[in-house]
Image: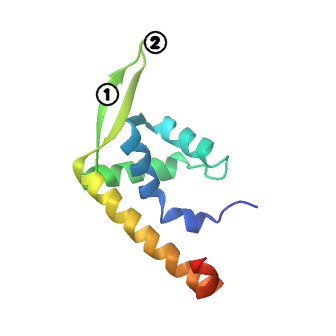
Amino acid sequence: MGINRELIKGSTSILILKLLAERDMYGYQITQELKTRSDNELQLKEGTLYPMLHSLTEVGAVEWYWYDTDEGRRRKYYKITDTGREMLCEKRREWKEFSKLMNVLIDGPEEALS
């Protein structure tokens, strides 16, 4: 069935920040990690990923650096900053509140609390 893209759109930044909080990654690696962890349900396209990385860089949540691999390839790696870690904490709090509210509205208060 798949997940509606509109539902995913609002959660892209938290997913990227979460992955970068675990380790530095390059763009393709981020997309593959999301795909793997979601059992192929989340397939983030370059047209979504790179503008989001750019936005996160602009607000100081993410920084990037070049890394030369052993094979001679140059990759642009992204890493989370202290600002990004604070943003991730805030977004996680918001997500928990939002999902709790949605569960109450959709399932009713009895089921949402169980």
Residue sitting at 48 percent across and 62 percent down?
11
Q: Position of residue 3 (x, y in %)?
A: 66, 62
Question: Percent x, y for residue 100?
Answer: 51, 76
Residue farthest along the right direction in this orientation = 1
Residue sitting at 35 percent across and 38 percent down? Answer: 78
Give whichever of 104, 85 is nearer the camera. 104
Q: Which residue is mark 1?
A: 66
- Residue type highlighted by circle 1: Trp
- Up the image or down, 46 lies above or below 108; here it is above
Residue 69 lies in what quarter of the image? top left
- For disc 2, the marked residue is 71
> Which residue is pictured at 30% across the width and 37% down the height?
64
Please give left or right for residue 87 compared with residue 8 in the image. left
Per the model, the C-alpha gap separating discs 2 and 1 is 14 Å
Q: Residue at x 59, y 45 (%)?
A: 37
Horizontal placement of 5 versus 18: left or right? right
Image height of 2 relative to 25, above or below = below
Which picture quadrant has residue 4?
A: bottom right
